[in-house]
Every structure is written in structure tokens, then in C-alpha cells.
């Protein structure tokens, strides 16, 4: 069961402005625990399970718990969402963030989700990234997502969800 609980002043409409910086949706190639090695940094010889990450393709989560390596496919760059909302998702026992794409991006997003749907984990996912190395979220894709909206993060704390929504341009 989804229980919508918008926040903020101005009635909590969930309307969106532009994100802090463009947001990219990229195909996941691999993942590993911890921080991605800096560009040009060699793999840790004491941790052979942490291979080197190709320059420009490694993204670290804000909590520094996960490094996601993306493919060289172009993905989708979003400069503005139609709407960004936060809601309490009782089924997932936490808070979630939903985005609604502008029409120009909705079809591209549907195509991108269709591309990764039939792949094995971890490649059956999209990395939602910002800037040169910031992983905002990683979304497992279980089917092509049409209709122009998607829940991009679940099981968050309320403040985490609000923070992510604000980064994505929620007003």
C-alpha cells in the first residue's frame, strides 16, 4: 500500500524544478562494495575482489557503501523532471522517491528500461548518477517501465528521501 505524504511549504505539491546538475540514467555493468578507486588509481592488491574501475565509469554512493561501474552505452540525461515526490511506502517499510519524466524523456526512459530488463543481476539495473562520480541510486529493473513515471528509490529514511528529492529538483 502506498501512502502519499508530500512535504514542504506551499502545499507540498511535489512540483519540480531543475536538479542541482543533470541526472543521468546509465546501464550498470558491475558493482563492488566501498568507494570506487579514483581515476588512474590501481586496484587494491589486498582486495582482489575490488578490480580497478575504468576512468569516468565508476560512481560511489553518498554513504560510501557501494561502487557501481556503468557501461559505455549513452543512457539518458535528464535536465528537468515534470514532478518529484516523496511518499511513505508501507509495503517496503520506508520512504520512497518517485519521478515523473517530461514527455521528451519518457519514451527514452521506457526504451532504456526495456534494454536492461532481461539481463542477469547486477546488469539488470540502472545507475542514477550526477556529476563525475556521484551515485544517487541504483534501480533494479524488473520490466519495461512505461507511462513516464518511476519509483527510483525505496526503503529510505524520511530525511534521505527528502534529500534525494531536493537534489532531483523538488520544490
Image (spheres, rainbow, N blue to C red):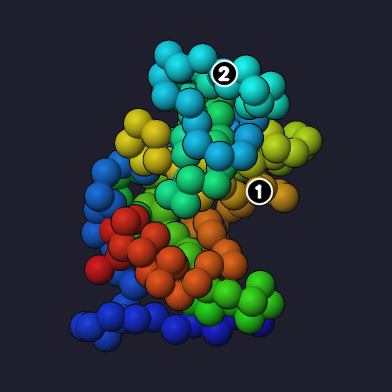
Residue 27 showing in the rendered view: no
Q: Residue at x 27, y 85 (%)?
A: 11
Residue labelled with disc 1? 140
Observer-side mark, 2 or 1, equals 2
Q: Is residue 165 left or right of residue 139?
A: left
Residue labelled with disc 2? 43
Horizontal and vertical percent for residue 21? 27, 44
Horizontal and vertical percent for residue 115? 65, 34
Say which of 166 and 47 sits in front.
47
Q: Residue at x 43, y 14 (%)?
A: 40
In three-dimensional space, the C-alpha distance between marks 2 and 1, rounded to whole angstroms, equals 27 Å
Horizontal and vertical percent for residue 65? 55, 47
Q: Is residue 111 left or right of residue 14?
A: right
Residue 170 showing in the rendered view: yes
Specify the quadrant of the image occupied by residue 167: bottom left
Query: Is label 2 in a helix, a strand or a loop?
Result: loop
Say which of 98 and 33 sits in front.
33
Query: Is label 1 in a helix, a strand or a loop?
Result: strand
Disc 1 crowd, CA 10 A, few/some/many (<14, 14-19, 20+): some
> Is 9 situated above or below 40?
below
Q: Residue at x 35, y 31 (%)?
A: 132
Q: Is residue 144 left or right of residue 4?
A: right
Specify the quadrant of the image occupied by residue 46: top right
Horizontal and vertical percent for residue 131? 33, 36
Specify the quadrant of the image occupied by residue 81: bottom left
Q: Residue at x 56, y 35 (%)?
A: 68
Say which of 109 and 162 sits in front.
162
> Is 103 situated above or below 42?
below
Amino acid at each position: 500500500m502506498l501512502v502519499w505524504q508530500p512535504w514542504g511549504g506551499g502545499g507540498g505539491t511535489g512540483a519540480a524544478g531543475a536538479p542541482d546538475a543533470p541526472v543521468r540514467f546509465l546501464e550498470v555493468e558491475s558493482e563492488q562494495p566501498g568507494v570506487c578507486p579514483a581515476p588512474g588509481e590501481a586496484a587494491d592488491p589486498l582486495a582482489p575482489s575490488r578490480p580497478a574501475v575504468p576512468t569516468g565509469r565508476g560512481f560511489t554512493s553518498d554513504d560510501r557503501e557501494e561502487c557501481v561501474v556503468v557501461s559505455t552505452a549513452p543512457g539518458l540525461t535528464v535536465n528537468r523532471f515534470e514532478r518529484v515526490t516523496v511518499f511513505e511506502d508501507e509495503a517496503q517499510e520506508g520512504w520512497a522517491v518517485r519521478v515523473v519524466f517530461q514527455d521528451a524523456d519518457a519514451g527514452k526512459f521506457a526504451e532504456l528500461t526495456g534494454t536492461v530488463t532481461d539481463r542477469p543481476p547486477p546488469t539488470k539495473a540502472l545507475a542514477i548518477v550526477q556529476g563525475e562520480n556521484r551515485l544517487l541510486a541504483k534501480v533494479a529493473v524488473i520490466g519495461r517501465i512505461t507511462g513516464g513515471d518511476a519509483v527510483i528509490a525505496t526503503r529510505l529514511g524520511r530525511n534521505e528521501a527528502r534529500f534525494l528529492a531536493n537534489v532531483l529538483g523538488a520544490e
